[in-house]
Image: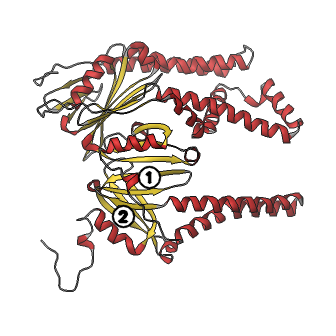
Amino acid sequence: MTTTAAAWRRPDARTLLVHCGWLAPPLASLALTALATGGAIPVGALITLAALAVSFAVVTAVGLLSWSRTGYQVTADAFVVRSGVLSRSVRTVPLHRVRSVDLTATPLHRLLGLAVVRAGASASGEGRGEIVLNSVAAPEAHRLRAALLARAEAGAAAHDPVLSRVDWRWLRYAPLTFWVVGGVGVVVGTVYRVLDGFGVELWRVGFVRDAFTEFGHSMLWLTVPGALLAVLALGSIGALAMYVENWWGYSATWTDERTLTVRRGLLTTRSVSIERARLRGVALREPLLLRAGGGASAAAVAGGLGDSEETRARSALLPPAPREEALRVTAGALRTAEHPFTAARLTPHPRAALRRRLTRGLLFAVAPATAALLALGLLLTPVLLTVAWIYALVAAATVWLLARDAYRSLGHALHGAHFLVRAGTFSRETVALERDAIIAWTFVSSPFGRRNGLLTLTAAVGAGEHGYHVRDMAADQAVAFASVAAPGILEEFLERPAGQRPVG
């Protein structure tokens, strides 16, 4: 890439074929409808398919016109993209503001040799900065990423070691994730909505109705556990498949002194590059089941990755893996000799924080259901009275265990240049944040929190989730802690002795 005036380039013409991918969902839905109805396609389904065909033709025509009016170039100091049909626009992003470049490729993109380029930049006064090129040839995508992340400094960048590569022994952690149960629900819900959109009432399909009838007439003490085991088995298979698809070919490497690159994906490939200047910390994520199995995952706290959903996906540094591996990867990302997660001792929070969690659990999880069961027992059958007190005992014990775990997870500390905070039980997360990344503090206290001497301190940063909370910390320590963690933010708001004027 030359640093002189560059020629305008156009997205690859094969991007028009990507629109053919829109035909897959309606064709698949047609096949499912024909299978569920024995080959008979309802009139409503035919009308829906006709409408989709017309929409596809219109969208394809618009795509052709949009492609012919789109161009881009990388000059000596800027990335310029012009687009628009009726309203022409030209976007110019200085190269020094480009913070990350994400390359993605769906199966169709890979079949056509294409990739989608997302260049994230630091936000301007108008909001989030991101340019998306859909689609360019894969070699051009890699060349474009190198050009956008290039810097003018002299000297070759030193070779940095690989932080981590995929180890398929980590597959044992896949069943300890959300997808074991949630994945089954997502698949069932998607199939139901597709069939419902084509006028197929799933509950009236013969084999579905027969299955539920047989299930209801069987011994529930055997069929219910059997059904749960089947769901868990299917969910585990799905979780393994998702793990392989998401993390196939995974590697996290420092490609030079300034760029951390994470590559992964089997069907949809993803390559995310994060500039070192925008990497403001790391997060160690330990959901309840994964933590029980000795595992964890890691994520980057960085700016320029997009909105909250995109940031969640593009900030991943490590899949569910052994906790020791997660600690090693986060240490490599921080580029520090001494890892704050293991070297720092977190400050525990007041016991009042434990009482708050117990109270919330009893009020919102135990009391309503117990009261409902008691009411139904008085109105319908005394059996529900026995169920009510059994539920109350089991639920109260569960709440007590979860509240204690949530309380033990609370903690905060300062370690060198980093601010640490930890919270959560179902999804515990420990964040190590660069102290100079903090741009503001927020103090929030509810009436109950003030009565117990607690408040929530939030550190605002221009990266990651943009706000990291120290929940239920001692109110009398919050101001002093914030003043030490990020000096220069609170001083002008603190009370001064009478007659003393602020410096400057």
Q: Which residue is mark 2?
A: 442
Q: Is residue 413 left or right of residue 183?
A: left
Q: Residue at x 66, y 20 (%)?
A: 32
- On the image, the x and y values in percent for residue 455 come to 44, 69
Q: Residues within 10 Å of mark 2 (few under 14, many from 20)?
A: few
Q: Residue at x 80, y 24 (%)?
A: 207
Which residue extends farthest bottom?
498
Q: With respect to residue 175, does 466 lie above or below?
A: below
- Residue 193 in view of the camera: no
Q: Name the one closer to the observer, 444 or 242.
A: 242
For discs 2 and 1, the disc positioned in front in the rendered view:
1
User: Label 2 sits on what residue type?
Assistant: Thr
Q: Is residue 371 left or right of residue 405?
A: right
Earlier-in-chain disc, 2 versus 1:
1
Q: With respect to residue 495, does 68 lie above or below?
A: above
- On the image, the x and y values in percent for residue 176 come to 59, 40
Q: With respect to residue 267, does 307 lie above or below?
A: below
Q: Which residue is mark 1?
A: 430
Q: With respect to residue 399, does 191 lie above or below?
A: above
Q: Residues within 10 Å of mark 1 (few under 14, many from 20)?
A: many
Distance of label 2 from label 1 (alpha carbons): 19 Å
- Residue 491 in view of the camera: yes
- On the image, the x and y values in percent for residue 356 come to 56, 68
Indicate the quadrant containing the C terminus: top left, top right, bottom left or bottom right: bottom left
User: Label 1 sits on what residue type?
Assistant: Thr
Q: Residue at x 28, y 55 (%)?
A: 417
Indicate the quadrant containing the N terminus: top left, top right, bottom left or bottom right: top left
